[in-house]
Each structure stands twice: as C-alpha cells, then as structure tokens.
Amino acid sequence: MAEAVRSLRLIWPKVADRHRFVAFSTGKDSLALADMLYEAVEPERPTCLYVHHDLEFPSNLDYLEQLKGHGFAVTTLTPFLG
C-alpha cells in the first residue's frame, strides 16, 4: 500500500492540467484506491465520481453518505440507460 501511495504522489502532479478525479464504486477496490489517493495528495480532496443506477442495491447510497461523513468528496451521477 505504501508503494501505491508513493506512486500516486509522483503521478498526481503530472496531470495537474487535467480535470482530476477518481472513478468510484462502493466496492473494496475503489474504496481502497480512493483512500490511497486521498492519503497521497492530502490536503487536496479530489472528486470521487460514483455512478448510481437502479440495478444496484439501495444501501449503496447509504454507504456513500457515510463516506461523505469521512471527508470523501463524492459526486453521484445517474447514467442514461436508454
């Protein structure tokens, strides 16, 4: 995990001219990545984009509220599934 944080610290400034964010779900992998990214770039809080659709469990939105309470900058999007 420490190696990943070091790598993120090196990469993050290289994309400073871009709109930086982390794609985010309520799964363990994306939660771990978001946590490592936040550690690497603190005090910056990049946006975590979460796409919610009706095929997921409603409890995911409750979980997202908990993450926001821990300081994660979560933006929830709804996809067009037409």
Image (cartoon, rainbow, N blue to C red):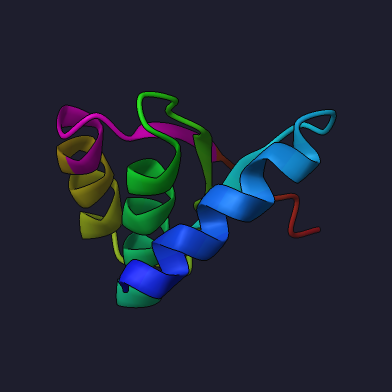
Considering every residue shown, the one lying at the far top of the view is: 43
Residue located 36% across and 24% down the image: 43
Side of 39 relative to 69 (left or right) = right
Side of 2 relative to 67 (left or right) = right
Q: Foreground: 59 or 54? A: 59
Residue located 33% across and 62% down the image: 31
Is 71 a magenta residue? yes
Q: Foreground: 23 or 39? A: 39
Which of the 4 image quarters holds residue 17?
A: top right
Q: Foreground: 53 or 22? A: 22
Vertical side of 16 occupied by 14: above or below? below
Residue located 52% across and 33% down the image: 47
Q: Is residue 54 visible?
A: no
Q: Is residue 29 visible?
A: yes
Which of the 4 image quarters holds residue 14?
A: top right
Residue located 32% across and 45% down the image: 39
The residues colored magenta run 67-76
Locate the C terminus and report the quarter of the image it occupies: bottom right
